[in-house]
Amino acid sequence: MSRFLDKKLVFLKPYIPGEQPKGIKKLIKLNTNESPFPPCPGVKKAAGRASKMLNLYSDPACTNAVNAIADFYGLNSKNVFLSNGSDETLAFIFHGFCPKGAAFADITYGFYKVFADMFGIKTRIVPLDNDFNIKVEDYKNLDQTIFIANPNAPTGILLPVCMIEELLLQSPDRLVVVDEAYIDFGGESAVRLIEKYDNIIVVQTFSKSRSLAGARLGFAIANDDLISDLNRMKFSFNPYNVNTISLLAAEEAMKDRQYFEKYRKEIIDNREYLSSELRRIGFKVLDSKANFVFAGRHGSISAKDYYDALRQNNILVRYFDSERIKDFVRITIGTSEQMRLFVETTEIILKGR
């Protein structure tokens, strides 16, 4: 740490992303909730077209990609904001929309705490119940900006849209941010609520269901005024925040609905297979509506030992050394072949206990 760093950032604890190992042959990588499938065919063609345009700045208004998102959801383009990954959108929201602080669950996306610390925002941590569910009534008397990951991470548990609406109704003067990174894998989006309420921002990503984690694309959907505010912050920070290749990729990914539906369904099917198999062999598996499962509490192996044993077999999952969830591992859903090998390897590990 240099002597020039502002003292307010001395105690900042950065977000720790999932490991991205290199050079390991035959690795089954199930630790960062990426899609196991390539992007739709149009994305590859788009990258070729973009190569002829890289001498120029990208479109700061992100016009075509924004229009494609709006068309997908049947909205006006004024209701859509595009960003360099959904984390950038969340950063803008923490920076600009939390005058009274931020409130979020004790077990949720780890970047919320980092953003709050980065921008000097006071936080209110609201514990999940014993079954890892969000209890809407616990937010009733809070005036901080509310952040809800839905489905939640790393549990995968979904909060129904009717409960999101209850949060909005609790306090019309309080903003609710619904982070829907995993919504396409089994939940109903809260997007439809923006036409009725002006105190909601829905944040989504291209990283999961549209296989574009490496393109760094995210977006927000909200009423015109909130989107205008997000653009005000963007144009005060980085007007060209999304590169040309990613803009064209976003447009193509939103247009190819058939490809999206095919692989979204395959991941859902593979998730249900893995959940069923893990329960069969004695694991507690939470009811996930995401592209991962949260499994653990097996009678013959601890979650940490399970994580280590899988790693020794070139299968990488995510383990969180946190008191409430140290008995679980998070497993990204892969291809059907990867899931079959995962179950077989798990059975071999358990037989050796």
Image: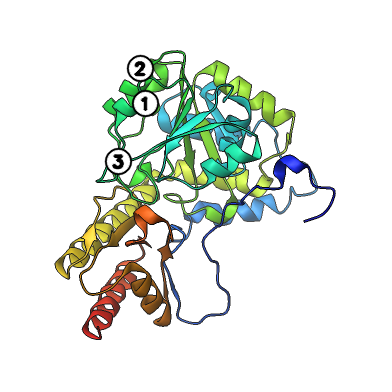
Q: Secondary structure at mark 2?
A: helix
- In front of the other: 139 or 211: 139
Query: What label sits on residue 158 in the rendered view?
Result: 3
How many marks on residues? 3
Residue at 20%, 70% (x, y): give it.
299
CA–CA distance between discs 1 and 2? 8 Å
CA–CA distance between discs 2 and 3? 20 Å
Amino acid residing under circle 1: Tyr
Q: Position of residue 45 (x, y in %)?
A: 58, 54
22 is higher (above) or lower (below) than 95: below
**N-term mark: 3 or 1:** 1
Residue at 27%, 26% (x, y): give it.
162
Amino acid residing under circle 2: Gln
Residue 338: image quadrant is bottom left
Residue found at the very far right of the displayed protein: 4
Q: Is residue 251 visible?
A: no
Residue at 44%, 43% (x, y): give it.
181
- In front of the other: 198 or 61: 198
Amino acid residing under circle 3: Leu
Reading the image, the residue beneath label 1 is: 139
Reading the image, the residue beneath label 2 is: 170
Number of other residues with Cα within 10 Å of mark 2, as a class: few under 14, some 14 to 19, many 20 or more: some
**N-term mark: 1 or 2:** 1
Nearer mark to the viewer, of 2 and 3: 2
The reply to whether dot 1 and dot 2 touch (C-beta < 8 Å) is yes
